[in-house]
Amino acid sequence: MGLWLLLVVAPNQGGEAPYAPGRRIAAIEEGLRLLAAAEAPLTQTLRGVVDVADRSRCRSSLQRLRVACLEAAVARHCRRLPRDAGATCRALGDIMVVNKLSEGAFVSSGERYRLMRARRDYRTALHALLRRRYAALTTAMVLWPAERCGAEEHACWAAAVDGYCLAAAADRGLSWHQCAAAITWFMGSVMRDDSTSERDD
């Protein structure tokens, strides 16, 4: 089990391995790099795999069982891919699973109910709302008085995300891993989209 999922089932923000700052920052940096380089179809398919598994075989009131089931669903999907793509898939899958488990921290049950009543495509509407919430959280991190980083300075941004989520996540009702996974996913996706736009130009 990777660091992201360990932090879900056994949260610990102290200095003990594997929760030491260097490990946390390295996990964020890896996520940013992989997301920035990943093809959009891979992340979209992975999101679908996690969504379907969570609605079906992985429904459980026990967090540890739900995490293990979603991790296994991601692993089955990633094994079908070529070796390099499979390794990327598994690493991104951990972040995707954290974000799936954290949805309730970003979208209330009342908001979900209103989306279901108002939207024919509930899943698309939910993902759009989550992206807006992740964007707002990322903006707050960027404006936070932390180190300023260049657009593709992944290590610098990883340290900034870690510092912000340690200092400010609780004020937003979030744990470190909920905060860090959401920002990592949003920032990495934006880096990928910006890179694609530059290539197209």
Image (spheres, helix red, strand yellow):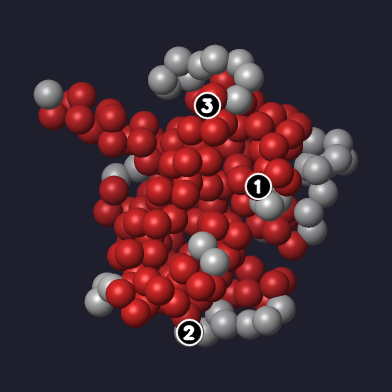
Instruction: Judge from the rendering whether residue 134 lies leftward or rightward of residue 71; answer left or right.
Output: left
Residue 52, horizontal then vertical, whole percent: 41, 76
From the viewer's perspective, is the residue at label 1 or at label 2 nearer?
1
Q: Residue at x 71, y 44 (%)?
A: 171
Residue 112 visible to an observer of this rendering: yes
Instruction: Provide the residue designation for mark 1.
Output: 172
> How far, Cα to Cα, is label 1 from label 2?
30 Å
Q: Residue at x 47, y 41 (%)?
A: 136
Nearer to the camera, 103 or 56: 103
Using the image, tell me which numbered label, if any, was put on residue 56. Answer: 2
> How far, Cα to Cα, is label 1 from label 3?
15 Å
From the viewer's perspective, is the residue at label 1 or at label 3 nearer?
1
- Label 2 neighbour load within 10 Å: few <14, some 14-19, many 20+: few
Nearer to the camera, 168 or 155: 168
N-terminal label among 1 and 3: 3
N-terminal label among 2 and 3: 2
Residue 45, horizontal then vertical, whole percent: 33, 62
Residue 122, horizontal then vertical, whole percent: 33, 73
